[in-house]
Image: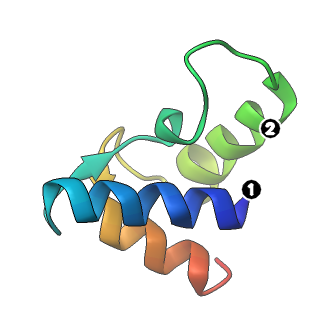
């Protein structure tokens, strides 16, 4: 999941610039094909780090890469 999330962040940054924001939903397909992983991402995003719904992709990429 970490590698995929970092790749998604990098893709968004390349396409839309360093100021682009995203939510944890960006790491998943439009259909919920892995509810356990979706809930794990939501827990990390909302409860663990108390992030806003949309955060800068650069910030999220750096947090994930650092192991947070």
- Density class for disc 2 (Cα within 10 Å; few <14, some 14-19, many ≥20) is few
Residue bearing mark 1: 1
Identity of the residue drawn at 61% across and 33% down: 28
Identity of the residue drawn at 54% across and 66% down: 6
Quadrant in the rendering for residue 39: top right
Q: Secondary structure at mark 1?
A: loop
Identity of the residue drawn at 46% across and 80% down: 62
Taking the image as drawn, is residue 48 in sight? yes
Tell me whether circle 1 and circle 2 mark residues in contact (CB < 8 Å): yes
Report whether 17 appears left or right of 65.
left
Query: What sort of colour scheme is used for the picture?
Result: rainbow
Residue bearing mark 2: 37
Q: Quadrant of the C terminus?
A: bottom right
Taking 42 as reference, is 18 above or below it?
Answer: below
Quadrant in the rendering for residue 33: top right
Taking 50 as reference, is 54 above or below it?
Answer: above
Q: Quadrant of the N terminus?
A: bottom right
Residue 5 position, x and y percent, is 58, 57
Report whether 50 appears left or right of 67.
left
**C-alpha distance separating marks 1 and 2:** 8 Å
Report whether 57 appears left or right of 41.
left
Residue 25 position, x and y percent, is 51, 33
Q: Nearer the viewer, residue 15 or 56?
A: 15
């Amino acid at each position: 999941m970490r590698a995929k999330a970092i790749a998604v962040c990098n893709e968004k940054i390349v396409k839309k610039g360093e100021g682009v924001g995203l939510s944890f939903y960006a790491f998943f397909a439009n259909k919920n094909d892995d509810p356990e992983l979706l809930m794990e991402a939501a827990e990390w995003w909302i409860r663990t780090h108390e992030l806003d719904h949309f955060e800068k992709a650069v910030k999220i990429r750096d947090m994930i890469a650092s192991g947070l």
